[in-house]
Amino acid sequence: MAPDLESDDGFGLSDILKALRRRWWIVAICVIVTPAAALAFSLSQEKQYSATATLLFQDARLDNQLLGDTTYVDSDQERTAATNTAIAQLGTIQRRTEAAVANRFPDVDVNVSVEQSGTDNLGTVTATAPSPTAAAVIATRFAEEFITFRRGAERETVTRAIALLERRIARLERTDGPRSEIEELETRKQDLENLSAVQTGNVQLVERAEVPDSPSSPKTRRNVALGIFLGGLLGIALALLVDRLDRRIRDESEIEDSVEAPVLGVVPQSKAIARQKGGLEALRPGDVEAFRLLRAELRYFEASKDASCIMVTSSAPGEGKSTVAWNLALCAAESGARTLLIEADLRRPVLALKMGATPGEKGLSTVLSEQVTLSEALQHYEHGEDVDHTFDVLYAGPKPPNPGDLLESENMTALLGEVRRRYDYIVVDTAPVPVVSDPIPLLSQVDGVLVVTRLGKTQRDELAHLRRQLSKFKAPVLGVVINGGARVGDYAGYASYSYAGSSGSEARMPQLVARPGGAVVDVAESDDTPEEEPAPPQGGQRQARTSRRRRRGLRARAGQGRGRRGGRRTRG
């Protein structure tokens, strides 16, 4: 046995692809909306231009100069980069720049960033402004103010060192210190004065900022491309999430795996079926052919060859089980079988109103409660002119206060035994098995169970619950009918299909009947008229019904089954 549906958490690549095919519209919406939003946001933003000036940082080893050591000592590049960046972020430099450009660009905010690589001595000063000219001017001016600030800081350090040397020289001269030491200090003082004169702050402007040709932001193309990428990811994630949270079954293959039974028929989504009242003549050829294929599957399917009494149920209300039961009975009657449709859903009967009949006060409930006989409650339908395509319907009747007790009673068992003797094919329309317990007693009294599901409505959990119940009660599940599925093939051509002779003109359709002894003849070409076969008594012999079914089947296969032009209903 396969594991329960809800315990199966596998979500492989095939499941992902199926989910994306089912929810493709979510992905499409995200792929359209996200880049559109990115484009709208980009167009609403004010254009900004960026200009860059380049600085060269030099290691002048000022401390070594102050100590009189001219030996080269390599400095820490990362620390130097961090120092330069920290200095550039000081509010002093920004305020100086704002004051310098205030006259020319009074309404422009100074927005500057300084970056330096730890592997070289180059630094970049990038200014961003609504005007390309303003961006270039601000970047260059900021670099110049940065150089001025560094130069001033270095000169102030040298000035303090010179002042210190002057105090030491003055003290030595007052105390008549060694002349050689005084001369040495004076030499160092002279060197520092020369150093102060040429001090550049250890930084130089090597490239002034140029006026940019295009805005640096917003980057519309990049934003739209990023929006498409992110929209696709978001759409896929949302589609998978929605599909995972949505417990409705939308894939036909998933139904067959869930019920562990073959799919015997697919009823297409059709407005004609939804509005159907009465016989098959109200349906389109493709719709009729779907129910005929279902009837053929049940008739020739190995597991259901001996199934003359079939229960039609579903996992929840509103999945179309009553419609399937009605049209399955019509197709069985069309093939010549004496057919009975029993509406055993006593809680929510819909067949009488749906098919344009008057529910009245007679039905299954009144038969089981022994208020009327079966013959009095039956409604008889006739279809066709030449061939007696008939079937009987036993509607639910008035709603009883105890539907479960009635269906579990001995009267129901006796009723099924009686109709098995009178009819060749019996279709029992019951309430959904997982919803109420009414149809459970019937599971052991029918030959097979047909499960009706509807794509986009049947819940995974409900279908799993139905499967467990049918398995627990060892119900003979024949297969599944998918309601609201995709239309398979093109049956429109059947409406105009006709027999044609060798010359291409329409030929007469043969009317075949069975003669005693097994011979089959054409009525039109025979000189004598076949004798009328006496009707068997109620609950009569199987051989008589088999002969009649063979004759009707031959006529139907010869083309006489088209006689569905209108129907008449008489009460039994």
Image (cartoon, grey):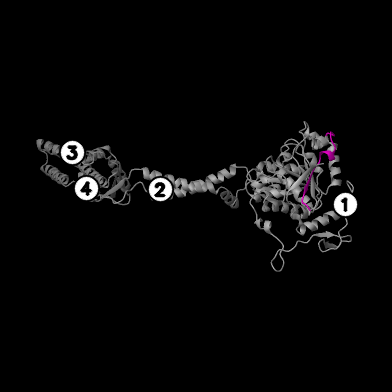
Q: Secondary structure at mark 4?
A: loop
Q: Which corner quadrant of the image does residue 244 belong to?
A: top right
| Amino acid on which disc 4 is placed | Asp
Callout 2 touching callout 3 (CB < 8 Å): no
Q: Say which residue appears at 68% left-offset and 53% top-offset.
A: 285
Q: Is residue 58 left or right of residue 467?
A: left
Highlighted magenta segment, given as a residue range: 369-385
Vertical relation: 505 (above or below) 104: below
Q: Say which residue appears at 83% left-offset and 54% top-offset.
A: 549
Callout 2 touching callout 1 (CB < 8 Å): no
Viewer-nearest of discs 1 and 4: 1
Is residue 370 covered in magenta? yes
Residues 333 and 60: in front is 333
Q: Position of residue 100 (x, y in %)?
A: 21, 40
Q: Which residue is mark 3?
A: 160
Residues 213 and 366: in front is 366
Is residue 97 covered in magenta? no
Could you give the CA–CA distance between mark 1 and mark 4, rounded to whole angstroms? Answer: 127 Å
Q: Position of residue 370 (x, y in %)?
A: 85, 34
Circle nearer the N terminus (1, 4)? 4
Q: Which residue is mark 1?
A: 542
Callout 3 touching callout 1 (CB < 8 Å): no
| Amino acid on which disc 2 is placed | Asn
Q: Say which residue appears at 84% left-offset and 42% top-offset.
A: 416
